[in-house]
Amino acid sequence: MQNRFARACWLATACVGLCAVVAAQQDAAPPSVLFDAKPTPILSGGVAFVPTWEGGDPTLVSIVSPVVLVPLGNNFVFESRAEFEGDFQRRQGNSGDFTGAIDKSLEYAQVDYIGNRYVTFTVGRFLTPFNIFNERLYPNWIRNTQSDPLIFPIGTGSDNGVMLRGGVEVGKDVTLNYAVYFSTLSNLNHLESERHAGMRAGIFMPHERLEIGGSVQHEFEDARFNRYGAHLVWQPQRIPFDLRAEGVYSHEEGNGLWAEGAYRLHNAGPAMLRRLQLVARTQLFYASTFTALNPDLPATDTKRTEGGFNYYLNDGWKALASYGRTFTSLGNSNIWTVGMTYRFLFPLGATR
Amino acid sequence: MKAFVTRMVLALALAITASAVAGNAPRPAQSAGAGSEGAPTAEMNEKWMIEGQKRFLINCGRCHQSPHLFSPRVMSTAVRHMRVRAMLTQEDMDYLLYYMTHQ
């Protein structure tokens, strides 16, 4: 199994390399932007304060997540994101003052080399490209529902290693995107990673605004098992609606899925309502018999449905509130969330 | 495991070499339709702006709200970052950068 997987990864990586050769022959002309804007370093990121009441116990979730981007020459970029998260809870559950430590993590610190239109090489610590939530939707200012999906701990996190990735227009209305990666084992504090390899591929149809894709990951540690994922994103052209969904299968860790719909009231009469987005998400998780393998997952089969709204105050601010209900064999509970998120961006160098 | 790592390293070396070769292929200079002094004509400008806006809605709007408008140097960095993060194509990147710096 490992040999077959290794062969598949090798072939995929080699194919990417060959694509680069082909690229030299097929450098078809995109519109030439050609202006002399030399990229400058920037500091970006997000801030979130999203108090959550789960089963009646409040947690003050406070997150600061800076992103540093440093362009290096014409084809390189260094990018890094750290996260400082304080989940402050009351000392006696529902009474007493709030206390708790601040978790610090380096989510990615990577150097990207944009080889050509077909491939980008990445080395360093990067977000695991397994499904799409981890890479694209994780920041609080982006996500529509604030709580992490139940299946999120499967196959995601950060990796230390190398990655090849890219997006290619393979037809007038089809774009292919892919990522192939290998990560090594690390137990260093704040730099933990698993030894595994994997790939993700997706097809995006811009006209239909539909993306579907799949992920596979092989763990080289201990049990040496596989994880499989699938994702879907759809934004119909006629209505301001987002549909996002992910599914995961892992015999050893469990399987499940989530689906989320978000409707922005762009066409509402009152201008105030046009900033409002209604959100609903439902999810299922079926635990495996090896629950100790991944302690971040629910220990039993779990279902959760949430509904709420996001209100976009201005360019960077978002207010939100949601209510959800969790169903498990051990009992049901409510989950309430209210809060604010903010996105920022500052240049760190000359802008002219 | 050792064989896997060896194969991956070999494949990576092949890919990097190939990319270096491909990277030397000349990017198009001013594309067809550009004016004689290198600036795009009004017609091309309009075409690129329309295409850029379309790609902005399709690609960026899939995940997040519109960002502030910043200087071309800042946007150039942001688009380079998003090319990697969101797997934008070279065409997306070119159109988006044009659109976001010519509004």
Image (cartoon, helix red, strand yellow):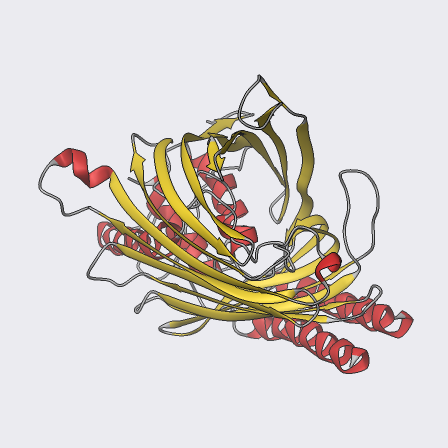
Q: Residue B74: x and y, percent?
A: 47, 34
Residue A179 visible? The answer is: no
Is residue A142 toward the left or the right of residue B58 in the image?
right
Q: Residue furthest top?
A: A97
Residue A170 visible? The answer is: yes
Is residue A63 toward the left or the right of residue A266 in the image?
right
- Residue closer to the observer: A343 or B52: A343
Quadrant in the picture for residue A72: top right
> The N terminus of chain A appears in which quarter of the rendering?
bottom right
Is residue B15 toward the left or the right of residue B96 in the image?
right
Q: Residue at x 85, y 65 (%)?
A: A222
Q: Residue A321: x and y, percent?
A: 35, 37
Q: Residue at x 52, y 25 (%)?
A: A350
For residue A278, above or below residue A256: above
Q: Residue A207: x and y, percent?
A: 30, 68
Q: Residue at x 77, y 46 (%)?
A: A192
Q: Residue A306: x and y, percent?
A: 38, 50
